[in-house]
Amino acid sequence: MISAVVRYQAALVLRSYRWVPPVLVYAAVMAIGVAGGDPLLGSFAWAAAAIMPIAVWLTRVSVTVEPAAARQTASAAVGPGRSHLAALLVALVLSGVLAALCTGVLAASTDRIADHATHGVDRGEAIAAGAVAQLVTILAGVAIGALTNRPLLRRPAYAVPLAALATLAALIVPGSPAARVLEVVTDAARNDSVDLPTTQLAIVAGVFVVAVAAVCRLAARVEHD
């Protein structure tokens, strides 16, 4: 049942074309920040930072695109909690697709792995590190989007600035999993040695699960009240 709702939510998002602006912004940011021949690990650090606000944006698109009447119908069919979960999963999948395409383009565009060509990191390790880094920031972005939109915040005047501030804080505050994973990949580019940021992935995955479970439960309660 949930897969059918995910397909329904995905169709709403794709047909609305509200996904186009974040995708264009993402493409522009990547084009500006990454030049051909740049070290792969450095490019992945930029890509991980760039995808996070896009994941927040796509989450807002996914949870607000459905008209009220259609949302009530879907909620009546599968439950408001599942309907909201499907919207969040669509945002997660769309962000993941963008990151996967970016990873493929970056991997094919340069032979350099790190800043110094000492070959301490092979291409597979670099791609794995970049993929994990982007997954961390995507999960963090969708979690932020979930917590700064319906059902917790319904007015864009509050939701959008809070989402922007939360995203910025997550990227720059020391100790944040997103900030730490960017540091790990950047250091790998400089030192030509990488450790997969699995600790940050585990932390942010836990936060993601808790945040999504909380907002879906709240959505179910709000719709039923």
Image: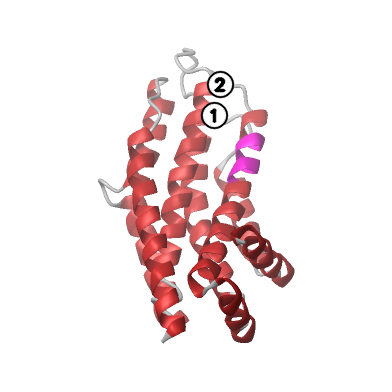
Q: Tell me which amino acid carries mark 1.
A: Ile
| Residue at mark 1 to residue at mark 2: CA–CA distance | 6 Å
Segment colored magenta: 99-105
- Residues 118 and 182: in front is 182
Name the image quarter holding residue 33: top right
In the rendered image, residue 90 lying in the magenta stretch gets the answer no
Name the image quarter holding residue 91: bottom right
Q: Tell me which amino acid carries mark 2.
A: Arg
111 vs 78: above or below: above
> Which numbered disc covers residue 123?
2
Magenta stretch: dominant secondary structure: helix
- Residues 28 and 62: in front is 62
According to the picture, the residue beneath numbered tag 1 turns out to be 127
Q: So how many labels did they put on this image?
A: 2
Q: Position of residue 155 (x, y in %)?
A: 44, 83
170 vs 77: above or below: above
Image side of residue 25 versus residue 162, left or right: right
| Residue drawn 61% across the image and 29% down it | 37
Q: Are marks 1 and 2 in contact (CB under 8 Å)?
A: yes
Tell me how the rendering is colored.
secondary structure
158 vs 97: above or below: below
Circle 1 — which element? helix
Image side of residue 217 versus residue 33, left or right: left
Q: Position of residue 109 (x, y in %)?
A: 66, 31
